[in-house]
Amino acid sequence: MKEVPKVEIKDKILLTVGEAEAYSNIGINKIRNITNEPSCPFVVYIGKRNRLIKRKEFERYLEKVIQM
């Protein structure tokens, strides 16, 4: 079986909710609440339940929110 190389979170394009939590230090429930909003710019749904976070857009979102 071929080994899959490990990629650091900072190098990924899409993050799981758990990775986004570790990356941002924001809780899973808060990330899920934000991504449930219809206008959320950084969420990608895979199927009906699985969601991935666009890392760069997530970073931009956090920069905007923190500046307030």
Image: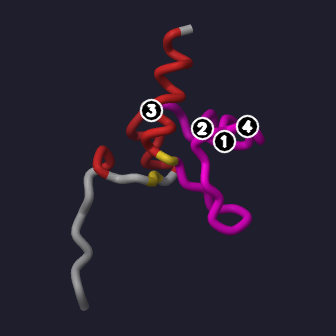
Front residue of 51 and 58: 58
- Given this view, does label 3 or label 2 mark the residue nearer the observer? 3
- Give how far apart the Cα atoms at labels 3 and 2 are: 13 Å
Which quadrant of the figure has residue 24? Answer: top left
- Give how far apart the Cα atoms at labels 4 and 2 are: 14 Å
Q: Secondary structure at mark 1?
A: helix
Report the residue that reaches farthest toward the top: 68
Magenta extent: 26-53
Q: Is residue 5 left or right of residue 44?
A: left
- Give how far apart the Cα atoms at labels 4 and 1 are: 8 Å
Which of pointers 3 and 2 lies earlier in the amino acid sequence?
Answer: 2
Front residue of 54 and 9: 54
Q: Which residue is mark 4?
A: 39
* Residue contact at pointers 1 and 3, CB within 8 angstroms: no
Which of pointers 3 and 4 lies earlier in the amino acid sequence?
Answer: 4
Residue type, numbered disc 4: Ser
Residue type, numbered disc 1: Thr
Q: Which residue is mark 3?
A: 59
Residue type, numbered disc 3: Glu
Q: Is residue 49 magenta?
A: yes
Report the residue that reaches farthest toward the right: 38
For the N terminus, give its image quadrant.
bottom left
Q: Which numbered marker is on residue 35?
A: 1
Q: Which residue is mark 2?
A: 31
Front residue of 60 and 25: 60
Q: What residue is rendered at 50% in x and 31% in y?
A: 26
Q: Secondary structure at mark 2?
A: helix
* Residue contact at pointers 2 and 1, CB within 8 angstroms: yes
